[in-house]
Image (cartoon, rainbow, N blue to C red):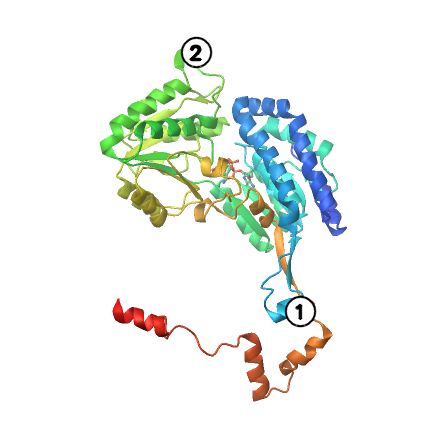
C-alpha cells in the first residue's frame, strides 16, 4: 500500500501550521462553515461510505448508518448548536473585587495544530468526530485514517479535500513505519484512537515535545450478570453487542462473568438470541461483519486454540474470507489464554463468578473502557460503581452510555485511555483555557503594598489582600468547630 510521501507530509504540516498562524481558523464563521460542510460531506456520500465499510469489514448499512454516518452528523449539529456557548469567555468569581475591576476572564483558545489518528473499526466516526472538536475549538488539523480499512481511507482522502478547507484540514496516510516521521513533527495536540500498545508509543512521542494527548484506547470490558438480573434480557443484549461489527467494538463485551446459579438459563438464552440474530439456514448472513484482517483472524484463532474452556456455540470460521462466527466458550478460568489480552473479536468467554468475585477480579486489573452490570439490585449496582473504575458504565444493557447518552463524555481511564470527547468534551480537548486580566491604573492605590522594600504593615496588607481569613470553621484534627458542631457532638 502506498502512503503519503514525506514531501506530502511536510507540505500538509507546514500548510496547516501556517494557516493556523494567520488566525484563519479562529473566527466562528470559519468554524461554522467547516462544521456545516462536514455535515454535507457525510450526507452527500452516505452510499459511498456504506460501500467502503462493506468492502473493509462487510459491515451492513444498518450498522454504518448509526455510527459512521448519522452519528457524526448529529455530532456536527450538536457542535453548531453549542458553538457560541462553548467558545464564550468564562467570567470567574465576579463577586471578587479584583476579578470584577480587572475584568478577569477565561478565554477558550485553540491549542493550535492538531493530529487526529484513528482506528479501523469505525473508520469515519473515529476520525471525523474528534475532528469536529478540533474545528469547534479553532484548531487546524491533520487527519490520519487507519490503513487497515483501505477502502474507507481512500474515500476519506478523496472527499475531505472536496468539502473542507485544504489550507487548514488535510488528510495524510501512513502505516506504523511512516508514523515515526509524522510524529517527529510538532503538534499542539494529538488525539489518538487505537490500541493500548500503540497508545503508549504515541504518549511517549508526545511527551518528548510536551504535546498534550487524548488517548482513546481499548480494554477488556466485562459484562457482569448477577443472580438478580433479568437473565433473558441480559443474554439478548450481550448477544447483540457481540454480533455488532463481529465484536470489533472498543466498548464491546470482552467476557462475561455470570453467577453460577443462573448460568444454564443465561447460556440457553444466549444461544437462542445468537440463532435469532444470525440464522444459520443461509450460512453466513450478509449483515455480519468480517474480522478486519488475516492477522487479527490468526490472533483470535491462536487464542481460541489455546483455551482450556469449551466451545459451546459457534466456532465456524474461514481464514480466506475472515469470517469468524460468534463463538461462546464456557468454563473459562481467569488464567485462560482468552483472558490474556483484549479480544476485540467475536469470541465470548464465559466465567463462573458471583458478582462479588467479578467485581474483585475487575478491580484488580487495568480499568476497562466499559463495564456492563446486569442486576436489578441497587446495592449490587453501587458495589460495582464503588469498587471498580472504568471509562463508563451501562447497567442492564450494553454500549449505550457511549452511543445513546446525549451531552455525556466518552473516554477511558488509566489503561483504557485519558481524556474524553463527544460534544463539548471534544471541544475541550483541543482548547487551552487562557486567563486574562486587565489591571486599571487606579488599582495602584489598592495594591501598592506589594512593592519593596518589604515592611510588616505591607506584609499584613498583602495577607489581607490574598486571603483575609483569620478564623476557620475547623480544628487541627480536621473536625468542624463552632457552636452547632459542638452541640451536635454532645447530643449525638
Ligand atoms: P492500532 O493501535 O493498531 O492502530 C491505531 C492507529 O495507530 C492506526 O491509525 C495506525 O496506523 C496507527 N499505528 C499503528 N502502529 C503504530 C505505531 N507503531 N506508531 C504510531 N502509530 C501507529 O489499533 P487498531 O488495531 O487500529 O484498533 C484496535 C484498537 O483500538 C483496540 O484496542 C480498540 O479497543 C481500540 N479502539 C478504541 C476506541 C476508543 O474509542 N476508545 C475506538 C476504537 C478502537
- Label 2 SS: helix
Q: Secondary structure at mark 1?
A: helix
> What is the residue that sits farthest to the left in this orientation?
261
Residue labelled 1 has its Cβ within 8 Å of some atom of ligand 1: no
Q: Residue 483 sits in which quadrant?
A: bottom left
| Numbered badge on residue 101 | 1
Find residue 267 and report its horizontal and vertical position in percent.
Answer: 29, 26
- Badge 1: how crowded within 10 Å, few (<14), some, or many (20+)? some
Question: In the drawing, does residue 80 fall left or right of residue 470?
Answer: right
Query: For this view, does 402 lie left or right of residue 334?
Result: right
Residue 157 at least partly seen: no
Residue drawn 71% across the image and 36% down it: 164
Few, some or many residues within 10 Å of mark 2 (<14, 14–19, 20+)? few
The N terminus: image quadrant: top right
Circle count = 2
Front position in the image: 390 or 492:
492
Q: Is residue 83 visible?
A: yes
For mark 2, what is the residue?
282
Q: Looking at this rendering, what residue extends furthest in the right direction?
A: 22
Q: Nearer the viewer, residue 193 or 43?
A: 43
Look at discs 2 and 1 and give the one toward the viewer. Answer: 1
Residue 179 appears in which quarter of the rendering? top right
Q: Outermost residue, top direction?
A: 281
The answer to which of 335 and 421 lies nearer the viewer is 421
From what the image shows, is residue 270 above or below residue 197?
Answer: above
Q: Residue at point 58% right, 64% down? A: 93
- Give how far across and how far down residue 76 sits, in percent: 63, 37
The image quarter containing residue 346 is top left
Amino acid at each position: 500500500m502506498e502512503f503519503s510521501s514525506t514531501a506530502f507530509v511536510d507540505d500538509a504540516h507546514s500548510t496547516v501550521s501556517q494557516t493556523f498562524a494567520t488566525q484563519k481558523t479562529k473566527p466562528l464563521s470559519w468554524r461554522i462553515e467547516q462544521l456545516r460542510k462536514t455535515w454535507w460531506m457525510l450526507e452527500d456520500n452516505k452510499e459511498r461510505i456504506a460501500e467502503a465499510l462493506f468492502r473493509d469489514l462487510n459491515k451492513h448499512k444498518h450498522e454504518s448508518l448509526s455510527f459512521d454516518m448519522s452519528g457524526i452528523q448529529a455530532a456536527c449539529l450538536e457542535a453548531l448548536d453549542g458553538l457560541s456557548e462553548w467558545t464564550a469567555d468564562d467570567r470567574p468569581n465576579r463577586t471578587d473585587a479584583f476579578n470584577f475591576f480587572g475584568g478577569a476572564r477565561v478565554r477558550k483558545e485553540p491549542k493550535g495544530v492538531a493530529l487526529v489518528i484513528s482506528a479501523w473499526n469505525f473508520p469515519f466516526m473515529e476520525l471525523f468526530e474528534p475532528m469536529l472538536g478540533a474545528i469547534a475549538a479553532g484548531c487546524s488539523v491533520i487527519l490520519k485514517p487507519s490503513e487497515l480499512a483501505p477502502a474507507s481511507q481512500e474515500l476519506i482522502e478523496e472527499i475531505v479535500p472536496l468539502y473542507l478547507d485544504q489550507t487548514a484540514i488535510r488528510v495524510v496516510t501512513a502505516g506504523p513505519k511512516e508514523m515515526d516521521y509524522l510524529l517527529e513533527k510538532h503538534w499542539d495536540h494529538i488525539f489518538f484512537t487505537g490500541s493500548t500498545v500503540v497508545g503508549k508509543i504515541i504518549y511517549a512521542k508526545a511527551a518528548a515535545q510536551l504535546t498534550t494527548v487524548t488517548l482513546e484506547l481499548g480494554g477488556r470490558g466485562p459484562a457482569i450478570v448477577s443472580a438478580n438480573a433479568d437473565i433473558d434480557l441480559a443474554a439478548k443484549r450481550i448477544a447483540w453487542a457481540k454480533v455488532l461489527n463481529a465484536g470489533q467494538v472498543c466498548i464491546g463485551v470482552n467476557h462475561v462473568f455470570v453467577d453460577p446459579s443462573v448460568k444454564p438459563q443465561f447460556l440457553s438464552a444466549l444461544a437462542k438470541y445468537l440463532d435469532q440474530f444470525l440464522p444459520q439456514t443461509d450460512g453466513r448472513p450478509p449483515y455480519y461483519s468480517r474480522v478486519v484482517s488475516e492477522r487479527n483472524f490468526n490472533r483470535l484463532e491462536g487464542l481460541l486454540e489455546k483455551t482450556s474452556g469449551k466451545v459451546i456455540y459457534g466456532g465456524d470460521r474461514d481464514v480466506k474470507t475472515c469470517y469468524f462466527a460468534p463463538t461462546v466458550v464456557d468454563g473459562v478460568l481467569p488464567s485462560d489464554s482468552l483472558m490474556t489480552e483484549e479480544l476485540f473479536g467475536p469470541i465470548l468467554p464465559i466465567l463462573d463468578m458471583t458478582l462479588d468475585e467479578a467485581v474483585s477480579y475487575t478491580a484488580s486489573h487495568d480499568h476497562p473502557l466499559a463495564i456492563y452490570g446486569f442486576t436489578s439490585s441497587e446495592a449490587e449496582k453501587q458495589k460495582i460503581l464503588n469498587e471498580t473504575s472504568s471509562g463508563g458504565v451501562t447497567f442492564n444493557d450494553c454500549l449505550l452510555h457511549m452511543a445513546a447518552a446525549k451531552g455525556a463524555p466518552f473516554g477511558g481511564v488509566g489503561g483504557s485511555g485519558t481524556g474524553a470527547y463527544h460534544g463539548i468534551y471534544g471541544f475541550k480537548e483541543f482548547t487551552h483555557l487562557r486567563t486574562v486580566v486587565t489591571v486599571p491604573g487606579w488599582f495602584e492605590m489598592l495594591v501598592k503594598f506589594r512593592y519593596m522594600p518589604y515592611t510588616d504593615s505591607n506584609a499584613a496588607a498583602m495577607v489581607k489582600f490574598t486571603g483575609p481569613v483569620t478564623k476557620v470553621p475547623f480544628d487541627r484534627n480536621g473536625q468542624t468547630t463552632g457552636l452547632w458542631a459542638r452541640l451536635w457532638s454532645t447530643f449525638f
